[in-house]
Amino acid sequence: MLLFCALVYRVFFFIVMVIATLSSVAVVTNCEFVSFEIADGTAGPIDGITFSTATFGMTRWNPDNQGCRKYISTDYSTEFRTARICAFLAFVCGAFCAFLLLIEIICIRLCGSRLGILMLCILAFILQAMTAIIYGKPECKASGGGPYRCQMDTGTSWTIAASCLYLLGAMMACPTPKSLPMVRYFMGKDRSK
């Protein structure tokens, strides 16, 4: 019975990691991470487009609600480049963690997997939280009294959700009991161990 409970716990842990990874994907693909508005009317041009309001994501942006479009320019601020790299690496860490869990659930036990999965979850948490560094952009720093206004948007909510789920995953990795892989459990081998 203990081995079955351990297996159910591992499956639940896997589901949490898959949801966290999908949240990371939403952060990377969403074009609404930061809402940006110019009080005096127009800004830009970015990619040859002049705008008064826009939402910016990691890979796409939406000027004046004209629809999401990919960035053409490669002239980004340091904060923006850092946020993009962190968002992508958080997804990679989360996906690799979920993959390791899936391997352990289905077929084999991996030596040192708890520590590896714990470290991946912590790294994914840190990287996902660092995507908020985008609010350090010069335009957002001026939002106190300047002509700019920066606000959180949908992508930021996805970042918060993914970060919390990665942190939950890190906490779940520690007490996770070793379970038999499904193949061995349902074949009836080694249930006594």
Image: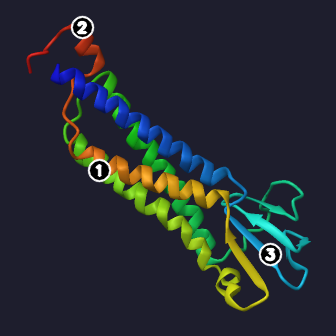
Q: Does residue 161 sit above or below 191 in this rendering?
A: below
Quarter of the figure with residue 149? bottom right
Quickly name the residue at label 2: 187
**Identity, as a three-letter code, of the amino acid under mark 2:** Met
| Residue 171, numbered label | 1
Work out whether 181 lies above or below 83: above
Q: What is the crowding at mark 3: few (fewer than 14 residues within 10 Å), some, or many (at least 20)?
A: many
- Residue 37's tag is 3
On screen, residue 162 above or below 2: below
Residue type at mark 1: give it.
Answer: Met
Q: Which of marks 1 and 2 is in front?
A: 1
The secondary structure type at the circle numbered 1 is helix
Q: Marks 1 and 3, Cα distance to the nearest angstrom?
A: 39 Å
Counting from the top left corner in percent of width and height, residue 76 is at 69, 73
Q: Looking at the picture, how far across and down is residue 152, in whole percent?
A: 65, 67
- Per the image, label 3 sits on a secondary structure element best described as strand
Say above or below: 12 vs 185. Answer: below
Residue 17 image point, x, y percent: 42, 41
Amino acid type shown at disc 3: Glu
